[in-house]
Amino acid sequence: MEVSIPPSEEDPSYAAFRNTIRKKKTAHAVLMIVAFVVMFPFFALGLHVFPSKWTVNIHGTFQLLALAVAIAGLGVGVSMARQIELIDSYHTVLGIIIVASLALFQPAMGMLQHMFFRKTGRKGPFAYIHRWFGRLMMILGITNVGLGFKLAQGPRGAVIATCVVAGIVAMGYIVLVSWIGRPRRSN
């Protein structure tokens, strides 16, 4: 029977491995925080805050950019999870489900709604599916950011800063969507 001996902290290959994992962990965290805490919410709000004939195209383009950032973050995260044997952790599995769901369904629902609107001039069922599924994925994505910090035993300052920014963005999002969606009174 062979006994596994933990690598020495002084072993250069182990130090290089730890350095690679540290860099991947940081890159993964930054990409996912930027995508889910900043880009997805702000680009979703842009559709309502800056209405114009170009808004839908701008919204779609920027959301695809946010999706590309999330896919890049997922790639780095899966690569790291495989290296440290956490590919089946709750954080990794949930991240794969969220990003895959966004990639497979959101652009399609957005395009179907856009085609429906151009044909009929009104919102269809795809509009509501696209809107609420997107909101659900943002909430799950932000939640998974927190689960990632827990799994990685992230630095307290980074956790607090991310929570503060996410809270401010969430409150701003809710206030703006509520304000924009309320019925207007005519005087």
Image (cartoon, rainbow, N blue to C red):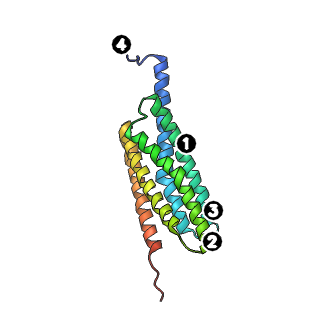
Sequence order check, earlier mark of 2 and 3: 3
Q: Who's the residue at 43% across and 57% down the image?
A: 136
**What residue did someone put label 4 on?**
3
Q: Secondary structure at mark 3?
A: helix
Q: Is residue 144 left or right of residue 78?
A: left
Residue 17 rendering spot, x and y as whole percentages? 48, 24
| Amino acid of disc 2 | Lys
**What residue did someone put label 2 on?**
119
| Amino acid of disc 1 | Ala
Q: Is residue 157 left or right of residue 50?
A: left
Q: CA distance from mark 1 to mark 4?
A: 37 Å
Q: CA distance from mark 2 to mark 3?
A: 17 Å
Q: CA distance from mark 4 to mark 2?
A: 69 Å
Q: Quadrant of residue 2?
A: top left
Q: Secondary structure at mark 1?
A: helix
Q: CA distance from mark 1 to mark 2?
A: 35 Å
**What residue did someone put label 3 on?**
57
The reply to whether callout 3 and callout 4 are in contact (CB within 8 Å) is: no
Sequence order check, earlier mark of 3 and 1: 3
